[in-house]
Image (spheres, rainbow, N blue to C red):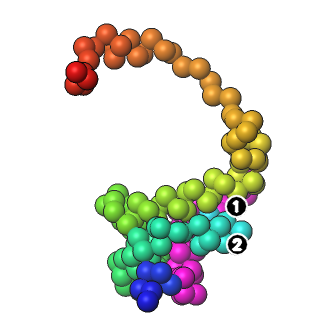
Amino acid sequence: MSNAADIAFSDAEVRALRDIAGTMIPADATLGVPGADDPAIMADIVKSLGRDLPDVRAAVAAVGAKANGDFASLDVDAREKLLSEHIASGGAASALARVILAAYYRDDRVLISLGMEPRPPFPKGHVVEQGDWSLLDPVRKRAPFWRKDR
């Protein structure tokens, strides 16, 4: 027997999630990037919910409740404020932000706009600029704080 958390998002929940995603990451014509409410990105978000489904469902419902059931009708500033406060609260809201951001930065158009090749990170890998390794010197000089095996 499955519980309610195992059932896919309803159309109303997808619409609410789309409104939230579009508020978090709006399209930018100047940069040529879509918003997180783009149909392809939304499809990726919904498809990749997996273990985060119950938390995302709870976060979407909480946002709707805080907006008195009509998040989409709020002006942009009110939506952004509501989301900022909700995400800062952590918990299920963190899962909501994480799944939206992850899907957004998987989109080829977004990667291209960032100057990255739209491909998986492996097997080629990505070049990471070397930093200042001397910043680790205080850690290297610190006495060990772990228990030694006997």
For the point 42% across and 16% down, which residue is it? 135
Residue at image mark 1: 34
For the point 47% across and 73% down, which residue is it? 53
Quarter assignment of residue 148 = top left
143 left or right of 26 in image: left
Residue at image mark 2: 39
Q: Which residues are magenta?
A: 8-35
Q: Nearer the viewer, residue 140 or 57?
A: 140
- Residue at the far front: name it: 150
For the point 34% across and 17% down, which residue is it? 139
95 left or right of 109 in image: left
Where residue 104 appears, x then y in whole percent?
62, 58
The answer to whether residue 45 is above or below residue 105 is: below
Q: Nearer the viewer, residue 7 or 25?
A: 7
20 left or right of 110 in image: left
Where residue 19 appears, x then y in whole percent?
55, 74
Where residue 21 appears, x then y in whole percent?
55, 67
Q: Quadrant of the C terminus?
A: top left
Would residue 30 be visible to someone looking at this image? Answer: no
Distance Cα–Cα, label 2 vs label 1: 10 Å
Quarter assignment of residue 79 = bottom left
For the point 45% across and 11% down, which residue is it? 134
Q: Mark 2: which secondary structure?
A: helix
The magenta stretch spans residue 21: yes
Quarter assignment of residue 39 = bottom right
Where residue 62 appears, x then y in whole percent?
36, 76
The amino acid type found where label 1 is placed reads Pro
The amino acid type found where label 2 is placed reads Pro
90 left or right of 107 in image: left
Would residue 103 be visible to someone looking at this image? Answer: yes
